Image: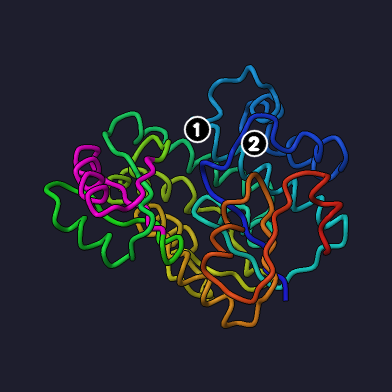
Amino acid sequence: MNVILFAGQGAQYAGMGKDIYDSYPAAAEILRTGSEILGYSLEEVCFDESFTELSRTLYAQPAIMAMELMCFEAAKAKGLSFEAVAGHSLGEYAAMVASGMLTAEDGFRVIKARAEAFDRVASSTDGSMAAILKLTADKVREVCESVDGYVVPVNYNSPAQTVIAGESSAVAKACEKFTELKARVAPLKTESAFHSEIMKPASEEFYDKIKDISFSTPSVKFFSNLTGTELTDFSDMPRILAEHVVSPVRFTDELEAIRNAGFDRYIELGPGKTLTGLVKKTLADITAFNIDSVEALEKAEL
């Protein structure tokens, strides 16, 4: 059975999706829809290499979702079938559109509200994030608890990769300790401490902006970062998404739940191969591949 996956912030790159945009009318329509909702040109943000702010949260989040939905439309045109969706952080929003929980128009309205809220907090707080590799999640948590200041695990990405976030000074102290333990430390190019309590003002603003948007029951299984399990209650999605902003991404648990539900083919749609790599590091005896170009789509066995 097929599950489609969508990655989060950090996967973006200049020029992403241009060949798919040029080759598939439904993909081009995604960018037209998004540009109309956002009030600026997604074509410029995604394709113009002179645009220097693609790494800024305000533009990165809508652009990544747009690229993911372009890949989704192209894959559907090539015969993609799937029985479940999942995303990593930001990727959950593309998953909501792909599953029919949100229309494309409302998907862009929601991600616009999220990106704006994140951008405001990023400009007024001092937070950072770092990926810690070659240590267990329990050890990462133990080190964070030993540091003065606020730093916590926020992304459980694989058995050997956990992302921490918090006050920049506390994150730096924790990273010193991780280096002493011979762990690999990779600072992330994010503008604040996403999925931590530092994002509480963004969570509150985000909820207020999306509380009246209509969310439908998805047409396929939807697996959640927040619980690490299949989500079955969709009665208050605005509250769930607001909580998601300040809660850890339980991706490792989520992958186990997906596998236990019988899924053995993991198809990542969108920029990069981040989730494909995490799947292969977490699960055995599965097939995982990514589609981020016309060439990759032509090679894929859908």
Residue 37 bears which disc, if any? 2
What is the quadrant of residue 50 in the picture? top right
Q: How crowded is mark 1: few (under 14 residues within 10 Å), some or many (20 or more)?
A: many
Horizontally, residue 51 falls left or right of residue 167, namely: right
Q: Residue 286 location in percent, x, y?
A: 66, 73
Q: Is residue 132 highlighted in magenta?
A: no
Q: For the image shown, how many numbered marks are present on the structure?
A: 2
Q: How crowded is mark 2: few (under 14 residues within 10 Å), some or many (20 or more)?
A: some
Residue 58 bears which disc, if any? 1
Horizontally, residue 108 falls left or right of residue 282, namely: right
C-alpha gap between disc 2 and disc 1 = 14 Å
Residue 126 bears which disc, if any? none
What is the quadrant of residue 45 in the picture? top right
What is the quadrant of residue 258 in the picture? bottom right
Q: Report the mark closest to the observer, 2 or 1.
A: 1
Q: Is residue 172 highlighted in magenta?
A: yes
Instruction: Report the span colored magenta.
Output: 161-187
Q: Residue 49 location in percent, x, y?
A: 66, 21
Q: Which comes sooner in the sequence, label 2 or label 1?
A: 2
Judged from this view, the residue extending furthest toward the left is 148
Horizontally, residue 23 falls left or right of residue 261, namely: right
Pick the quarter of the image with the N terminus.
Answer: bottom right
Between 202 and 87, which is closer to the camera in this rendering? 87
Residue at 75% across / 49% down in the picture?
71
Residue at 70% across / 30% down in the picture?
15
Q: Residue 145 location in percent, x, y?
A: 17, 58
**Disc 1 secondary structure class:** helix
